[in-house]
């Protein structure tokens, strides 16, 4: 087989000239960071402290400080750390997001092939019998013969108007979108595990306090019923206390239900069935409240939040789609070259005189399509406007999340302080009631009422403590979760 190297060289030279064309459509530019200097209207200050109470430490906001990639370790709970590591290794939603990223990366690698010529090789063998009424095909004038044809074909479509470049830009933007979806799944998973563990600890403490409250109310009912029997109480007092007992008892089943659901949630987050829920239990007293809270600069937030970066990647993809739709309305050029050999015997396929070659160039351009390509181009431009507005909305929501969380942390600290003061006052009341009861100055019902009030303030205190832990975790999530400090996710952070 002989190939005309000069001819193929001409094809490749022409391709190099044509590929130097421009890429139609807009060139994407990253949106500028918002021109704001803070998250809240009022300047931030350290939160109030409540000494001697779990979760009562004052929290300080450190402006410009970076976020740890394993921020959950700041709660200093080994069971929590172990559960999160188990969840990161086994959660199926996270694994699905990782697989989606692998798909997107392979699509990027596959797209690179459009920049190279397409080379194919073929071989055909046939046995033919020619009609004697027609001129025979071989030079030997035989009417029956065999044909053996090895052939190499080269085709190339020069990227004159940048269609291939815009398609490559599109799949790269889609890869970035898949990457930030995976990072968002990672961040949501870690925050959900922390929030569920905190909620479970709070529910268990509330269940314990509620059961004690039910016991106290039960004793009150029994005492009043005895006094009614002896004539020292009336039926209205008994009915009132029975109503209170029933109301308190009615609050226990929902707490038990919520606790069981949190255990089921923790199991599923860790990639297990509900019947395989983690054996570790969580208590608020075993968690340490982080005191120094990093607070990213507003200009850095848009470069950290995965949802904002995902919206930016979608905006980039929409920009590339405009170029693709524009290029589809312009002419396409294809260059082809064929070289091979045809012989009547397999042993002669490379003999002199059996070779053939051919060069071709084709140009196709849309003339009339009923407006399809025009409206597809307009749709791409409208989709870009849509993506731009979605990006701006995502940025505003990100700043709102941070501002809401900062406000919540301030109010949580004040709420805990008030709840602790109420618990202290109820405890003093209980102590005085116990002394008066021992000295005969207070009735048993007065003592039980003081105990009930103390238990109720304990439940309120538990809820206030849980709010501080949960909103602290929410702040780390609102600021982006520090994923850029994890080696497994920090690759190509700014590559769009």
Image (tube, rainbow, N blue to C red):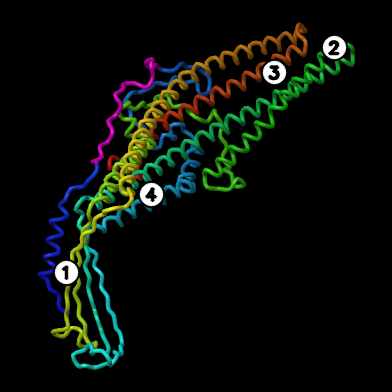
**The image quarter in which residue 132 lies:** bottom left
Compared to residue 412, the image places residue 84 above or below, namely below
Element type where label 1 sits in the image: strand
Is tag 2's residue or tag 3's residue first in the polypeptide sequence? 2
Residue 154: give x, y in percent of width and height.
21, 67
Disc ID at residue 293: none
Residue 485 seen by the camera: no
* 2 or 1: mark nearer the eye: 1
Labels 1 & 4 near each other (Cβ < 8 A): no
Q: Is residue 379 left or right of residue 255?
A: left
Is tag 3's residue or tag 4's residue first in the polypeptide sequence? 4
- In magenta, the rendered stretch is 26-45
Q: Which residue is mark 3?
A: 452
Compared to residue 399, the image places residue 241 above or below, namely above
Q: Which is more toward the observer, 62 or 350? A: 350
**The image quarter in which residue 140 lies:** bottom left
Q: Dot 2 surroundings within 10 Å: few (below 14), some, or many (20 or more)?
A: some
Residue 436: give x, y in percent of width and height.
73, 8
Is tag 1's residue or tag 4's residue first in the polypeptide sequence? 4
Q: Dot 4 surroundings within 10 Å: few (below 14), some, or many (20 or more)?
A: many
Labels 2 & 3 near each other (Cβ < 8 A): no
Q: Is residue 98 left or right of residue 113?
A: right
Q: Specify the farthest residue to the top.
A: 441
Q: Which residue is mark 1?
A: 359
Is tag 4's residue or tag 2's residue first in the polypeptide sequence? 4
């Amino acid at each position: 087989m002989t190939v005309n190297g000069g001819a193929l060289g001409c094809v490749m030279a022409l391709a190099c000239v044509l590929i130097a064309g421009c890429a139609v459509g807009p060139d994407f530019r990253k949106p500028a960071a918002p021109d704001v200097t803070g998250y809240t209207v009022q300047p931030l200050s350290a939160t109030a402290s409540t000494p001697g109470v779990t979760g009562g430490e004052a929290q300080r906001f450190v402006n410009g400080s970076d976020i740890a990639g394993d921020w959950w370790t700041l709660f200093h709970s080994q069971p929590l750390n172990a559960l999160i590591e188990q969840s990161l290794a086994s959660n199926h939603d996270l694994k699905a997001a990782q697989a989606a990223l692998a798909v997107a990366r392979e699509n990027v690698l596959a797209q690179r092939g459009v920049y190279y010529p397409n080379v194919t090789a073929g071989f055909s063998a046939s046995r033919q019998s020619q009609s004697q009424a027609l001129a025979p095909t071989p030079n030997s004038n035989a009417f029956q013969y065999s044909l053996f044809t090895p052939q190499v074909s080269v085709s190339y479509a020069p990227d004159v108007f940048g269609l291939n470049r815009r398609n490559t830009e599109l799949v790269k933007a889609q890869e970035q979108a898949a990457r930030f979806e995976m990072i968002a799944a990672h961040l949501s998973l870690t925050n959900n595990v922390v929030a569920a563990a905190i909620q479970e600890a709070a529910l268990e403490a509330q269940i314990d306090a509620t059961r004690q409250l039910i016991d106290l109310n039960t004793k009150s009912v029994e005492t009043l019923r005895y006094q009614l029997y002896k004539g020292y109480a009336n039926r209205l007092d008994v009915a009132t206390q029975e109503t209170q007992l029933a109301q308190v008892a009615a609050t226990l089943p929902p707490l038990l239900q919520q606790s069981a659901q949190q255990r089921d949630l923790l199991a599923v987050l860790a990639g297990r069935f509900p019947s395989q829920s983690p054996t570790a239990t969580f208590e608020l007293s075993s968690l340490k409240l982080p005191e120094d809270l990093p607070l990213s600069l507003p200009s850095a937030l848009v470069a950290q939040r995965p949802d904002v970066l995902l919206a930016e990647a979608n905006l980039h993809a929409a920009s590339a789609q405009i170029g693709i739709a524009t290029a589809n309305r312009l002419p396409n050029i294809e260059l082809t070259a064929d070289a091979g050999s045809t012989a009547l015997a397999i042993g002669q396929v490379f003999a002199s005189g059996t070779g053939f070659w051919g060069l071709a160039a084709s140009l196709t351009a849309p003339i009339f399509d009923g407006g399809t390509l025009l409206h597809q181009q307009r749709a791409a431009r409208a989709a870009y406007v849509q993506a731009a507005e979605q990006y701006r909305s995502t940025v505003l929501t990100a700043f709102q999340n941070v501002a809401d969380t900062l406000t919540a942390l301030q109010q949580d600290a004040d709420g805990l302080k008030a709840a602790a003061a109420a618990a202290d006052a109820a405890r003093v009341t209980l102590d005085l009631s116990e002394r008066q009861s021992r000295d005969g100055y207070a009735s048993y019902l007065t003592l039980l009422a003081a105990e009930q009030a103390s238990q109720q303030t304990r439940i309120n205190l538990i809820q206030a403590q849980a709010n501080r832990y949960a909103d602290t975790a929410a702040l780390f999530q609102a600021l982006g979760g520090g994923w850029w400090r994890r080696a497994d996710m920090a690759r190509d952070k700014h590559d769009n």
